Image: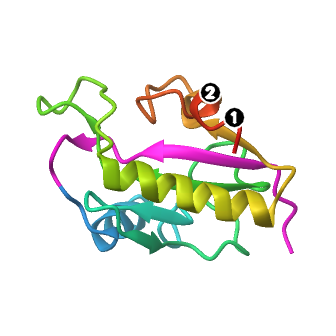
Amino acid sequence: MREINKIIVHCSATREGENFEVAEIRKWHLARGFSDIGYHFYIDLHGEIHKGRDISQVGAHCKGHNRNSIGLCYCGGVEADGKTPKDTRNTEQKDALIAVLRTLKAMYPNAVIHSHNDFAYKACPSFNATKEYENI
């Protein structure tokens, strides 16, 4: 079993209001040479939680931090212009994110929840997940 000390929240950097299924994200990652989708969980625009890579497997979502982390991604994170970062989470996505994070924290109580941008010079996840979820 992997030792998990981080749960890293991402956005798919897709336009506000556009839904992308987990199969599409997987396709993008396979095209980049990944062995599977890089995230362990993906939340679509409707708040549906999709399993990605098995949590027993090292993810491919945060360079230098994959070995001991779980990656969680929500659909969105960019304004309709396709460029400008924006917190596009709707109520269903927010509820789903909290549900997954609570479950993961119960499984890995010592893991710290982080925004992807804590480790990379990116806007991802387009909100401060580290601060917002610090008390989960």
**Is residue 11 shown in magenta?**
yes
Residue placed most toward the observer, 134 or 16? 134
Q: Residues within 10 Å of mark 1 (few under 14, many from 20)?
A: few
Q: Is residue 68 left or right of residue 35?
A: right
Residue 14's spot in the image, x, y percent? 25, 44
Q: Quadrant of residue 31?
A: bottom left
The secondary structure type at the circle numbered 2 is helix
Residue 8's spot in the image, x, y percent? 62, 46
Residue placed most toward the observer, 65 or 44? 44
Q: Quadrant of the N terminus?
A: bottom right
What segment carries the magenta color?
A: 1-18
| Residue topped by disc 2 | 131
Q: At 80% across and 49% down in the image, what residue appears?
A: 111
What's the residue type where badge 2 is placed?
Lys
| Residue 6 in view in this figure | yes
Q: Are marks 2 and 1 in contact (CB under 8 Å)?
A: yes
Q: Residues within 10 Å of mark 2 (few under 14, many from 20)?
A: few
